[in-house]
């Protein structure tokens, strides 16, 4: 990936519609510039034609980022090595690559050279900025002197060819003695100049007076993705012998490069415990054994400048409890030593050499003496003990006080915000800082804040070399880097310390990157320097160029951050809030990854999907709407159903608010709903004043008082006086029932007495003795015999005729 120019970054900040039209116009304009001259040349061979040029600048400089993908590209470099001795014969390779969608006709390749020595930065700038659009195919002063030329056959779409030129010692005599040799190449079809390139290489004819201190910084990261953890399958792929992470590690391990590591990679391996792929644990061990300076990026390489401009400082990951499997963390701690799946507790906040400052068990092997084991054995943790967040993220970093925001994204207050978050020194791109005067050292103070400013020219060349698709292109970019260093070494009046950064992401070719680092390290113009040395160099005062993030990006990111805050509040319905806030925060940081900056459509899509998922989570605990409720009692309960679609049980407080005084609700009910289930809740209510319609607003909240879900309105009709009416009617019915029963009993007794009296008058029997005149209880008819006595008397008459006759003859007694 070519280094982005200021023009491209400005293009991105245009409104989307304008930017789309501008981008769409580029290939059209390029096609017009390239194919119209080619068609004219084919139609009239050897005839006159306007000299139209499609320029592909050397070293992938600023304009190249716009037209490089659909143009004819030229690269040139020495066949052997990346430096030139003007006093010796040399062979130069020129690579012609047809990246257009049409064939290029048979053409001529010309090798050109600068017409004057390149002894300082101004002459180098003049050579690299030669306006070849104002020259014709025969060359000219601006295009340099033609040193040699050769014919090239037609090139099919996507075809690449390499032609070689061997120059005698006298060919570069005009540039003899200068620290830099300028060479160029032209591709012409007939009289039409199709493409040009200009390159610069360090000359061995001018040895350096002093070597320039050079600090290189590279990042180990993964491509942009929406997940805050790397799954096991991806780890297997990326940590394989030829995997992405393995290539990145191999390119810098043991070389003079400071390495920034995405903590997400370390955490993704550690959370798997004993289930981590063997290649992943081996990769982690190799990282620990690496002697390089190491410092952490923000988790998931989240965009620090974006976070600062949103006012949220530096967001950390919160928890990993949702992904830890107790079975993967045996209690014997067999793998705690080293890195593999261990859970060392080192924090690595020192500032010395890598691997010597960690305090945990996961520090890599170093020359420091190993402490003798203590006599007291360490207690064994319980089998279900899981690593904490700090243990998962722990690493013996060389230093943890560096901020490395994305290129050209830092605004005025960001450096102070970084320092407030504990990141006291910021690594800035050249586009974000005003150009310095002579001897622009990397160490700088900007508004009283410490910073390391990357050299723009050097960083462009370094990145081009690492991302080149061909050997010739890589060597041309490497030569440009050495040319810059050779000039700096000759011009500097004091020891100079420069900084160059490799591009983040997966675009770098590890082989090209390794070759570049080796060439720089072996160069006579370079003295490799550590980050600590660069920071310790006396700083120069510099001025920040305010380059805030784009408004649209800030708006989308603000929605993401606000949603994360809402999830944190909602998670209070859980016994263990980490189960929700952990994955939410990790995925948020993944969406803020610097790697998304170059893929706005992909980022917008991933962000939208994440927002939808979080919206579903926020609505996962709700009150189920209900039909109309009729209330006919002064005190009753309103049934309510609460639904939980989360895979975890939740505890909520159910509250009912009536719309008027016809109902009174005094109690709030706390209820626990099992995972993925519903629960019925009865809310006690009391009739107030009068009857009529009431709207009951049922709402949920966590036990901490955080509102949960949306309130639901349940219509209710109150008829509280129906309770008294119903009781009265029931009482009347009961009185009537028992009254009728009593009346029937009295009437039966009277009927029986009447029948008894009539039977006694008709019977004329003789009188019995007084003792027989009374019944078994001694009560007379006048005193009122009971039902039982009457029954007994009647039974006696029926069964004893003699007694019956006697009773009939007995005369009534007085009183």
Image (tube, grey):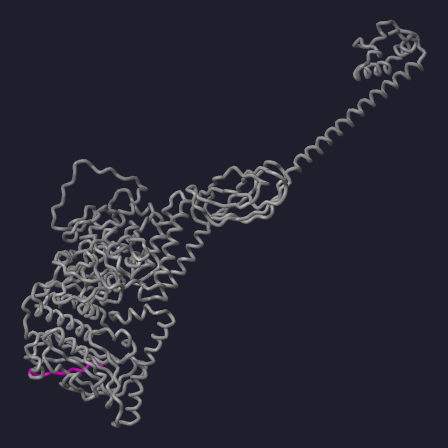
Instruction: Based on the picture, tell me whether residue 636 belongs to the magenta stretch.
Output: no
User: In which quadrant of the rendered image does the C terminus lie?
Assistant: top right
What secondary structure characterizes most of the magenta part? strand
Side (left or right) of 373 relative to 31: left
Instruction: Name the one closer to the observer, 10 or 447.
Output: 447
Residue 727 is situated, as x and y percent measured from the top left of the image, at: 68, 33
Instruction: Based on the picture, tell me whether residue 163 belongs to the magenta stretch.
Output: yes
Instruction: Name the one closer to the observer, 40 or 270.
Output: 40
Query: Which residue occupies 14% across, 61% down?
Result: 540
271 is higher (above) or lower (below) than 597? above
Instruction: Name the one closer to the observer, 685 or 583.
Output: 685
Residue 272 is situated, as x and y percent measured from the top left of the image, at: 31, 51
- Say if residue 248 shows up in the picture: yes
Instruction: Name the one closer to the observer, 179 or 697.
Output: 697
Residue 51 is situated, as x and y percent measured from the top left of the image, at: 25, 88
Side (left or right) of 184 relative to 795: left
Q: What segment carries the magenta color?
A: 161-169
Instruction: Examine the image and state in which quarter residue 27 appears.
Output: bottom left
- Say if residue 111 shows up in the picture: no
């Amino acid at each position: 990936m070519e280094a982005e120019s200021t023009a491209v970054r400005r293009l991105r900040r245009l409104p989307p519609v304008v930017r789309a039209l501008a981008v769409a116009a580029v290939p059209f304009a390029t096609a017009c510039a390239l194919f119209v001259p080619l068609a004219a040349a084919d139609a009239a061979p050897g005839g006159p034609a306007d000299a139209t040029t499609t320029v592909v600048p050397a070293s992938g400089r600023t304009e190249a980022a716009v037209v490089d993908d659909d143009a004819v590209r030229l690269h040139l470099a020495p066949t052997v090595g990346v430096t030139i001795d003007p006093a010796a014969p040399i062979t130069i390779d020129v690579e012609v690559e047809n990246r257009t969608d049409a064939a290029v006709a048979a053409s001529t390749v010309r090798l050109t050279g600068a017409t004057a020595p390149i002894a300082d930065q101004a002459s180098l700038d003049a050579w690299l900025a030669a306006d070849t659009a104002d020259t014709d195919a025969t060359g000219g002063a601006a295009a340099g002197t033609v040193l040699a030329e050769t014919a090239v056959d037609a090139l099919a779409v996507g075809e690449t060819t390499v032609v070689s030129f061997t120059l005698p010692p006298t060919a570069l005599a005009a540039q003899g003695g200068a620290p830099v040799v300028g060479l160029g190449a032209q591709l012409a079809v007939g009289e039409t100049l199709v493409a040009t390139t200009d390159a610069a290489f360090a000359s061995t004819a001018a040895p350096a007076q002093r070597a320039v201190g050079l600090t290189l910084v590279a990042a180990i990261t993964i491509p942009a993705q929406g997940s805050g953890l790397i799954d096991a399958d991806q780890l297997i792929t990326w940590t394989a012998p030829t995997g992405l992470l393995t290539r990145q590690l191999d390119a810098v391990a043991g070389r003079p490069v400071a390495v920034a590591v995405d903590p997400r990679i370390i955490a993704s391996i550690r959370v798997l415990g004993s289930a981590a792929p063997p290649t992943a644990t081996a990769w982690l061990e190799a990282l620990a054994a690496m002697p390089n300076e190491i410092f952490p990026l923000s988790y998931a390489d989240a965009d620090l400048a974006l976070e600062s401009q949103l006012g949220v400082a530096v967001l950390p990951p919160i928890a990993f409890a949702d992904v830890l499997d107790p079975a993967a963390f045996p209690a014997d701690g067999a793998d705690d030593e080293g890195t593999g799946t261990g859970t060392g507790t080192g924090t690595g906040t020192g500032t010395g050499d890598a691997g010597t400052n960690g305090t945990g068990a996961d520090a890599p092997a170093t020359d420091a003496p190993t402490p003798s084991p203590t006599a007291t054995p360490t207690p064994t943790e319980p089998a279900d003990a899981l690593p904490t967040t700090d243990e998962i993220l722990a690493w013996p970093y060389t230093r943890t006080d560096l901020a490395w925001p994305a290129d050209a994204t830092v605004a005025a207050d960001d450096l102070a915000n970084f320092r407030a978050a504990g990141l006291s020194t910021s690594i800035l791109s050249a586009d974000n800082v005003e150009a310095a005067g002579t001897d622009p050292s990397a160490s700088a103070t900007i508004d009283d804040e410490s910073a390391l400013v990357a050299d723009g020219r050097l960083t462009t060349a370094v990145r081009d070399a690492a991302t080149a698709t061909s050997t010739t292109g890589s060597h041309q970019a490497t030569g440009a880097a050495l040319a810059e260093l050779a000039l700096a070494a000759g011009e500097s009046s004091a020891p100079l310390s420069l900084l160059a950064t490799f591009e983040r992401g997966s675009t770098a070719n590890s082989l090209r990157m390794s070759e570049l680092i080796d060439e720089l390290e072996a160069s006579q113009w370079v003295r490799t320097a550590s980050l600590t040395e660069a920071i310790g160099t006396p700083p120069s005062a510099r001025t920040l160029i305010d380059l805030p993030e784009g408004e649209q990006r800030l708006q989308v990111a603000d929605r993401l951050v606000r949603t994360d805050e809402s999830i944190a509040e909602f998670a209070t319905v859980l016994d263990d809030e980490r189960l929700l806030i952990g994955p939410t925060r990790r995925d948020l940081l993944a969406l803020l990854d610097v790697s998304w900056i170059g893929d706005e459509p992909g980022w917008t899509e991933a962000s939208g999907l994440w927002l939808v998922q979080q919206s579903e989570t926020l609505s996962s605990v709700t009150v189920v709407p209900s039909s109309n409720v009729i209330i006919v009692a002064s005190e009753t309960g309103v049934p309510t159903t609460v639904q939980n679609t989360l895979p975890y049980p939740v505890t909520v407080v159910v509250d009912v608010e009536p719309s008027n005084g016809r109902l009174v609700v005094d109690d709030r009910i706390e209820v626990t709903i099992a995972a993925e289930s519903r629960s019925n809740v009865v809310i006690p209510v009391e009739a107030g004043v009068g009857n009529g319609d009431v709207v009951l607003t049922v709402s949920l909240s966590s036990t901490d008082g955080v509102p949960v879900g949306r309130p639901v309105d349940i219509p209710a009709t109150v008829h509280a006086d129906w309770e008294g009416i119903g009781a009265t009617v029931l009482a009347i019915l009961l009185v009537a029932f028992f009254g009728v029963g009593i009346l029937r009993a009295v009437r039966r007794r009277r009927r029986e007495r009447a029948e008894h009296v009539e039977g006694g008058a008709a019977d004329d029997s003789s009188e019995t003795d007084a003792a027989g005149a009374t019944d078994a209880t001694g009560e007379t008819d006048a005193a009122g015999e009971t039902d039982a006595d009457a029954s007994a008397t009647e039974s006696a008459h029926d069964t004893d005729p003699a007694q019956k006759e006697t009773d009939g003859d007995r005369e009534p007694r007085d009183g």
